[in-house]
Image (cartoon, rainbow, N blue to C red):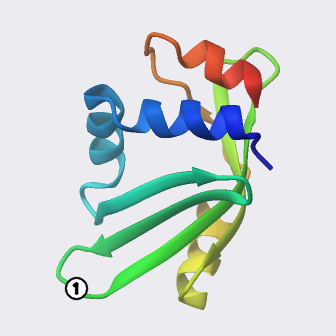
Amino acid sequence: MPSMIVCMAVNQAFKSGKVQNLISDATGRYARIISFEARRDGYHASVQLLGSSEVLDVTVREIRASGDKQHFSLHGFEANQIWLTHVLEDHVEGREFPLPDLPGLGTVIGML
């Protein structure tokens, strides 16, 4: 689980325009991120699928950095819709994604 310092750093990073653009590029074809917050029990997002009025809640329990701090992976998905939990477990959980080149990101990743 993230420490309070990591939560604050992640929440601050999420508010940056560059991070918002990266997330929109990754998810914009499917959904709109309504909110995101790092808390002591994990990372929480509310999303709205395109073409739907329903808001889906997703929790990721852990973000892991690779040994070389060049990639990250997401673990421990839980969503308010079981089908979404299963899709995330089958297609996202444990998969490594390259870290974007953003100032200060290495510091945050070093805390994970």
- Residue kind at label 1, given as amino acid type: Ser
Is label 1 in a helix, a strand or a loop? loop
Tell me, yes or no, if residue 96 can be seen here: no
Residue 38 horizontal/vertical position (percent)? 58, 50
Which residue corresponds to the image point at 61% horizontal and 14% vertical from the top-left? 106
Which residue corresponds to the image point at 29% horizontal and 66% vertical from the top-left? 31
In the rendered image, which quarter is residue 8 located in? top right
Residue 47 horizontal/vertical position (percent)? 36, 69
Above/below status of 90 relative to 101: below
On the rendered image, what quadrant is the C terminus found in? top right
Which residue corresponds to the image point at 43% horizontal and 15% vertical from the top-left? 102
Tell me, yes or no, if residue 77 can be seen here: yes
Above/below status of 77 relative to 40: below
Residue 96 horizontal/vertical position (percent)? 66, 38
Instruction: Give the residue at mark 1.
Output: 52
Residue 82 horizontal/vertical position (percent)? 60, 89
Name the residue nearer the viewer: 101 or 87: 101
Above/below status of 76 relative to 112: below
